[in-house]
Image: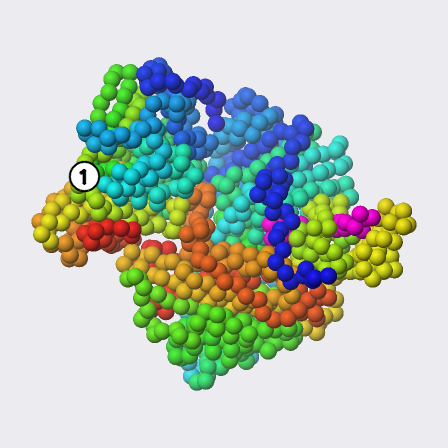
């Protein structure tokens, strides 16, 4: 770990000002991901800007929807009565991630910016373009069991590890950011990016930009939404595949459908085509199976992750089925 | 006086542990301590072409850097198991060869841990790399050599004719994955030299006296000049019995720099160079008569070792103990791959061996439409077929019967017929067994005028509950309360307490402590501790002391000692999404006398939980290209969490095994894990009708 300086920002303005003067500065929130990364030489910031004292700690209703301050803990989001009532898949996704202790300190902003758990990224013994551009991708020919099926490139086959981000993608959440140049809003599905030939970049965030909040737009269709996470152990493990699904029925037909997956790609993957397909159809296994087939059409399995194609289809089918029946725990 | 032996006693060290005052090896605060961080190889096979330490040397706080070019001197130990033993025969930094990824190729020492780690990161290495062999399919298997002085192969009768003439036969191949010990306490060593001829080492050790002799051998010192201190050990499972390369290097470097030195291994490093259980492939052939008597058992096993030491996972050792057959064949093959050195891991051999054998027994039972409990009862061994000796105090049948009763086994429904909340439900069972082992130990007991008793022995408590077991033994022998007994362990200055391994600490130490306590009463010429104490007070002396030793004797020529058990479990399988959960567990164990019912049940539960890990999730992959383990910490190497673990019902049956030792104890540390994975896979078969023969049973396999 290289020496770094530490400053505690007292206002958003001060934080973004400080960040604008130093390209190698990094914000630190809960630190549950960043500190681990620093210990294994993945990040070597010159300075840490501690943002934990900033006024971004509230969950409040606004004209645009429910606004989650960037510093709200993952636990507080999951437990919030309005989130539980209106966005049950979000509560469920958070509670199925990490551990209670980690969720208590992990923040909304930090969760969005946690980096991949690709083992080849995590150890400098392996070649990794994400860690160091143009050094190669050891995962391509390695044990790529947890890796991407969709949207990968020959530079990077890593997946985004977040659970929380999967329902956020399905809900068309909005990411609110601020820098010394001003404020802007980024639609959630544009926030994370595909690796292409710049796998070092996970998001479309510009240097020095601070996440200030995530906004959940009203989503009447999400009341019976579900989150299904499949993994190698029953708790405290990242997803092999996960599904955020919401099905709203009217007269026994599907009125609205939302479908997103984790563990599939470099970003939380939203299946808009499958969603459109579902609208107007009868909510039955056959329909859901067809949606799953459609969703996985473009999947490009690697040597060890082929099983995830079938697992993903089954997970989609199950999640849609449970949501259509009124939701609950899967 | 109520007998304390055989009751439920809370651990004496419990409060220290939960309040953080228990001192583990890396916790010792020593004046002037400096820190080391090892540099490890990023290739698995080849040579170091250049190793450039210049940038590291310039970094702040760096004190010294060792590589193969300036390796500190160490003598080759005799490496005879009972005298001195290191895990890896090749000494650290002995040349420029790289045999496996993660091999230690340097040590950077600095004034702080962080600076040492940064320095290690700055060491630049160029290699002449060769293609490593890290996949068993590319390895060359040969007959395994004898291990610890014993042949691994064994034949009785003729399996070929035994199989040919049988009414029913099955043959199947079972595999297990490479597994890591993953103890809570990482490997860590502090070495403190007093001059150049006297040495104190703080390091987790399952056998202090052997560690002491080994370090004496390595550094050319008399044993009494080496002191090993380890009052608490945070789990070992076989990985902390002898010095690993990092520990040898730490002690050697500390002598060179003339400062106390601490090296703590990271989880990442521990995946590669502090041991593992080899992957295994086992083929079992069983043949039976029409009434279900085994007419042949062939058990053929393969495992992997490293290029720098020889260790065979002795999967077949358990077979001649468990079931009788006139025709029996055991073979073990071994291949060298470019991986770290495998070693003993909780029930070495027995655990994977029972996975294969007890799965095969289930397959045979289904093939013959026999109840698997009945099949086992029919074929129960009368003697240990390899030793040719009868078993002492064997109650295997009772384990099966009591287990079946407690579980409700007789109501077992048809194959693939039971469902709950949309999931398939299955019941499975398997036998459990582990040999009764015992070693030589010594202890000193001291009675003080205030009525307290001290027990002193170097044997240690790996977290298993030995402090409490020793206290119970003394309290019982002297008729006093456990609170009055103070136990000191984990220091090689104390009398040799033997090995905490092979489930033998209790069987080895309890008889010794009992004997020393009896000697106290004899010395005082009294029948109770109260009388002895009164006599002591009158005498004005400071204490009454007695030392005792005990060791196995001729009984091992008359009997075979073995512990027995049975596991029964229920699983649910959500077939569509490949989700398997273990929902109910009953274990019944016959392990001789129980000293502490609480700790003993806890050991069995720990074994079952580790067995669930083995069955469901534990797996260390090696990268096919550079050979480095792809798992790098406890978030990627999965061991069971609470959510994976059902309530575990443990019952003990049987009687004290007084042929074995005067306490009648056989030990309980390892038996719990044996048979667990087979019971689970057998339950999955009952639930789904699908037989799984490759562990772990991860979702990819379940949906295949
Ligand atoms: C053992 C373990 C298991 C885990 N399991 C799961 C799991 O199953 N599912 C899951 O989803 N997650 C899991 N996590 C990840 C966890 O959710 C993240 O570590 C956490 O959400 C990160 O939040 P943080 O506030 O601690 O971020 P930090 O570590 O403080 O920061 C992470 C990154 O975000 C940046 N950052 C933080 N806040 C802002 C902001 N407001 N604006 C701009 N940049 C910012 C930092 O610079 C850094 O790059 C696990 C973590 C651990 C350690």
Query: What x and y, as percent, mark residue B482?
Result: 70, 53
Q: Say which of B297 and A276 sits in front.
A: A276
**Depth check: A319 or B184 in front?**
A319
The answer to whether residue B38 is above or below residue A299 is above
Q: Nearer the viewer, residue B619 or B107?
A: B619
Q: Residue A128's quadrant in the figure?
A: top left
Q: Looking at the picture, how far across and down is residue B663, in whole percent?
A: 70, 64
Direction from residue B685 to residue A228 in the image, left or right: left
Q: Report the residue at 44% width, 51% height from top.
A: B642
Judge whether residue B367 can be spotted in this image: yes
| Quadrant location, the N terminus of chain B | bottom right
**Mark 1 residue element:** loop
Q: Chain of mark 1?
A: A
**Does residue A158 show up?**
no
The quadrant in which the C terminus of chain B is found is bottom left
- Range of residues picked out in magenta: B447-466
Report whether the residue tagged 1 is closer than 8 Å to ligand 1.
no
Residue A227 percent coordinates (x, y): 27, 47
Relative vertical location of residue B682 with respect to residue B503 in this rendering, above or below: below
In the depicted view, which residue is nearer to us: A157 or B550? B550
Judged from the image, the quadrant occupied by ligand 1 is: top left
What residue is shown at x 74% (from left), y 56% (from top)? Answer: B480
User: Most prominent secondary structure in the magenta stretch?
Assistant: loop
Dividing the picture into quadrants, the one containing residue B550 is bottom right
Q: Which residue is mark 1?
A: A219
- Position above or below: B226 against B519: above
Residue found at x 74% / y 41%:
B226
Residue B670 % position (x, y): 57, 59
Q: Is residue B454 magenta?
A: yes
Q: In the image, what residue occupies the spot 59% across and 73% down?
A: B395
């Amino acid at each position: 770990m290289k020496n770094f300086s530490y400053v505690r920002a007292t206002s958003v303005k001060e934080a973004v000002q400080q960040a604008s003067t130093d390209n190698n500065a990094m914000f630190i929130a809960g630190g549950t991901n960043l500190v681990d990364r620093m210990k294994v030489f993945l990040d070597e910031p010159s300075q840490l800007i501690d943002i934990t004292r900033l006024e971004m700690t509230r969950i409040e209703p606004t004209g645009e929807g429910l606004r989650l301050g960037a510093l709200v803990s993952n636990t507080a989001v999951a437990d919030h009565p309005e989130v539980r009532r209106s966005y049950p898949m979000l509560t469920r996704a958070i509670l199925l991630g990490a551990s209670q202790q980690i969720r208590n300190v992990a923040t909304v902003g930090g969760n969005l910016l946690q980096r991949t758990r690709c083992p080849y990224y995590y150890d400098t013994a392996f070649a990794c373009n994400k860690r160091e551009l143009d050094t190669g991708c050891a995962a391509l020919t390695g044990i790529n069991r947890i890796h991407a099926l969709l949207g990968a490139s020959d530079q990077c086959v890593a997946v985004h590890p977040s659970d929380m981000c999967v329902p956020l993608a399905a809900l068309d959440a909005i990411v609110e950011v601020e820098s010394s140049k001003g404020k802007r809003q980024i639609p959630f599905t544009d926030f994370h990016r595909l690796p292409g030939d710049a796998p070092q970049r996970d998001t479309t965030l510009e240097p020095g930009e601070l996440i200030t909040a995530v906004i959940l737009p009203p989503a009447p269709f999400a009341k019976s939404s579900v989150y299904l996470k499949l993994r190698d152990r029953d708790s405290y493990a990242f997803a092999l595949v996960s599904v955020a699904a919401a099905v709203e029925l009217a007269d026994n037909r599907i009125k609205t459908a939302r479908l997103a997956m984790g563990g599939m790609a470099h970003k939380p993957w939203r299946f808009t085509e499958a969603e459109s397909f579902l609208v107007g159809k009868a909510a039955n296994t056959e329909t859901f199976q067809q949606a799953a087939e459609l969703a996985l059409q473009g999947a490009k399995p690697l040597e060890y992750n082929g099983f995830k194609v079938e697992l993903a289809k089954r997970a989609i089918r199950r999640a849609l089925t449970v949501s259509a029946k009124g939701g609950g725990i899967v | 006086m109520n007998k304390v032996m055989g009751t439920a006693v809370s651990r004496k060290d419990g409060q220290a542990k939960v309040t953080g005052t228990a001192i583990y090896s890396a916790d010792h605060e020593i004046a002037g301590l400096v820190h080391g961080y090892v540099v490890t190889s990023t290739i698995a096979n080849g040579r170091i072409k250049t190793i450039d330490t210049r940038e590291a040397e310039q970094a702040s706080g760096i004190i010294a850097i060792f590589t193969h070019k300036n390796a500190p001197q160490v003598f080759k130990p005799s490496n005879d198991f009972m005298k001195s033993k290191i895990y890896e025969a090749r000494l650290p930094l002995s040349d420029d060869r790289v045999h496996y990824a993660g091999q230690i190729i340097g040590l950077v020492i600095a004034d702080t841990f962080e600076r040492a780690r940064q320095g290690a990161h700055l060491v630049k290495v160029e290699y002449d790399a060769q293609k490593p062999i890290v996949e068993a399919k590319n390895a060359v298997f040969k007959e395994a050599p004898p291990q610890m002085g014993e042949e691994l192969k064994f034949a009785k009768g003729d399996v070929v004719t035994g199989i040919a003439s049988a009414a029913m036969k099955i043959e199947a191949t079972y595999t297990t994955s490479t597994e890591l010990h993953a103890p809570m306490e990482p490997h860590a060593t502090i070495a403190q030299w007093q001059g150049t001829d006297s040495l104190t080492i703080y390091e987790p050790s399952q056998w202090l006296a052997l560690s002491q002799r080994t370090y004496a051998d390595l550094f050319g010192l008399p044993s009494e000049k080496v002191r090993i201190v380890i009052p608490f050990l945070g789990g070992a499972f076989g990985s902390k019995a002898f010095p690993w390369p990092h520990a040898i290097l730490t002690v050697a470097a500390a002598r060179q720099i003339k400062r106390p030195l601490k090296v703590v291994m990271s989880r990442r490093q521990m995946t590669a160079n502090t041991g593992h259980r080899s992957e295994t492939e086992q083929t079992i052939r069983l043949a039976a008569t029409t009434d279900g008597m085994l007419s042949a058992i062939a058990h053929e096993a393969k495992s992997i070792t490293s290029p720098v030491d020889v260790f065979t996972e002795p999967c077949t050792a358990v077979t001649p103990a468990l079931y009788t057959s006139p025709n029996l064949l055991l073979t073990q093959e071994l291949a060298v791959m470019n991986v770290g050195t495998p070693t003993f891991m909780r029930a070495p051999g027995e655990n994977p061996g029972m996975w294969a054998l007890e799965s095969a027994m289930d397959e045979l039972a289904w093939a013959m439409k026999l109840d698997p409990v009945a099949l086992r009862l029919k074929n129960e061994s009368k003697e240990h077929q390899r030793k040719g000796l009868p078993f002492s105090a064997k109650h295997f049948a009772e384990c099966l019967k009591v287990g079946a009763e407690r579980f409700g086994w007789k109501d077992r429904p048809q194959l693939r017929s039971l469902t709950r909340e949309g999931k398939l439900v299955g019941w499975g069972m398997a036998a459990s067994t582990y040999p009764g082992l015992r070693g030589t130990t010594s202890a000193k007991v001291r009675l003080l005028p205030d009525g307290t008793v001290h027990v002193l022995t170097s044997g240690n408590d790996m977290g298993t509950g030995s402090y409490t077991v020793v206290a119970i033994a003394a309290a019982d022998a002297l008729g006093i309360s456990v609170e009055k007994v103070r136990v000191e362990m984990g220091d090689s200055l104390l009398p040799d307490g033997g090995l905490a391994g092979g489930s033998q600490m209790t069987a080895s130490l309890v008889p010794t402590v009992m004997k020393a306590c009896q000697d106290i009463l004899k010395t005082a010429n009294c029948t109770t501790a109260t009388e002895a104490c009164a006599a002591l007070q009158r005498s004005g002396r400071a204490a009454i002391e007695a030392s005792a030793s005990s060791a196995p004797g001729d009984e091992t020529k008359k009997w075979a000692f073995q512990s027995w058990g049975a596991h029964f479990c229920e699983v649910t399988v959500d077939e569509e999404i490949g989700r398997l959960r273990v929902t109910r567990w009953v274990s019944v164990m016959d392990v001789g006398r129980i000293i502490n019912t609480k700790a003993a049940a806890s050991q069995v539960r720990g074994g079952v939980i580790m067995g669930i890990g083995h069955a469901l999730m534990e797996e260390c992959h090696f990268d096919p290209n550079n050979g480095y383990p792809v798992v790098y910490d406890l978030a990627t190497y999965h061991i069971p969490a609470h959510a994976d673990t059902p309530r575990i019902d443990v019952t003990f049956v049987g009687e004290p095994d007084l042929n074995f030792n005067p306490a009648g104890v056989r030990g309980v540390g390892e038996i719990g894990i044996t048979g667990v994975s087979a019971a689970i896979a057998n339950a999955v078969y009952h639930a789904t009708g699908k037989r799984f023969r490759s562990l772990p049973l991860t979702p990819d396999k379940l949906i295949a």
